[in-house]
Image (spheres, rainbow, N blue to C red):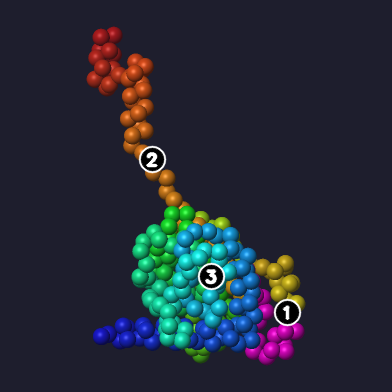
Amino acid sequence: MSRETERGPRSAHNAASGLRAWFESEPGHAVACAELQLAGDVLPDLFGYHVLQLGQAYSTPMIACSRIQHQLVIATGPACGGEGLSARAEALPIQAGSVDVLVLPHVLEFARSPHAVLREAERVLIPEGHLVVLGFNPWSLFGLWRLAAGWRGNMPWCGRFVGLARLRDWLALLGFDIERVERLSFRPPLRRARLHAKLEFIERLGSHFWPVFGNVHFVLARKRVVAVRPIRASWARQRRRAATGVIEPTARERYAAETDE
C-alpha cells in the first residue's frame, strides 16, 4: 500500500472530526445556525423521492428540514458514533441518476479533487435535480484568517477555500444552472463568546453593505437537461413535402436544367 493511499483515510478522519469540533466552538456554532436557518428556507421547496447529504459538518443533518421522506447522510470521514455510512466523496456508492437533491456542506474545501466531487454529484443527480453547495469564501474575514493561521493545520483554516467564481465555472462546465446564491456570516472567527456576541451587529451591516465578503456562500444549482432533436422530425418534413409535390431538385437535375438552357 502506498503512502498516499494510507494518508487518504487518515486525512479524511482528521478533517471530518476537526470540522465537527470547530462547528461546536463559538464562531463555528454561529455559522452552523446561520446555515441551518438558510437551509430551512430553501430545502423544503425542493421536492423528489431521495435527498442525500454528503458530509457531516455538524451533528444536526441539514436535510432534516426537507419534506422528502427518504433522507440519507453519507460521511466523508468516520460516521458519527460509528454508525451510518461512510464513503469517498469522489466515488459514491449511489446509482447514477437516482438522487433528487444533493447537499454538500463544506465538502469541497477538504476534498482531494473538488471538481471530481462535483462530477460525482452530477452523475448521481437525476435530470433537473438540485445541488446545494456550502463553502467558505476565500475573499472574506475567514479567508484572511486562513492566510494567517492556515499553516498551523487547524480546522477549518487548513482547507482550500473555493471561490464563488471558480465554483460557478465548474458548475457551468458540468451542465448546472445557478438558481440562487446567498452569502452569510460576516463576523471574524473570535473564540471569546462575549466579544463575539458584541459583534453581532456586523451581521446586519454586512448583509446590506458588503454581502460579497460573506464568510460562507450558499449556492443552489439545477442539473441542466440537454434537449435532443429527434431524427424522425426531418423525415416527417420530407414526407409532407413529397405529399404536397414540393420537392427540391437534386444537384444532377439542376445541372441538367442549366445545360439545356
Q: Secondary structure at mark 1?
A: loop
- CA–CA distance between discs 3 and 2? 37 Å
How busy is the neighbourhood of tag 3: few (under 14 within 10 Å), some, or many (20 plus)?
A: many
249 to 179, vertically: above or below: above
Q: Residue at x 60, y 78 (%)?
A: 32
Q: Secondary structure at mark 2?
A: loop
Residue 47, percent from left and from top: 53, 59
Question: Which numbered dot is residue 200?
Answer: 1
Instruction: Return the disc, 1 or 2, that comes first in the chain's sequence.
Output: 1
Instruction: Return the disc, 3 or 2, that comes first in the chain's sequence.
Output: 3
158 to 67, vertically: above or below: below
Q: Amino acid at mark 3?
A: Ile
Question: Which numbered dot is residue 229?
Answer: 2
- CA–CA distance between discs 1 and 2? 54 Å
For the question of whether residue 102 can be seen, the reply is: no
How busy is the neighbourhood of tag 2: few (under 14 within 10 Å), some, or many (20 plus)?
A: few
Mark 3, mark 2: which one is toward the viewer? 3
User: How many discs mark residues in the rendered view?
Assistant: 3
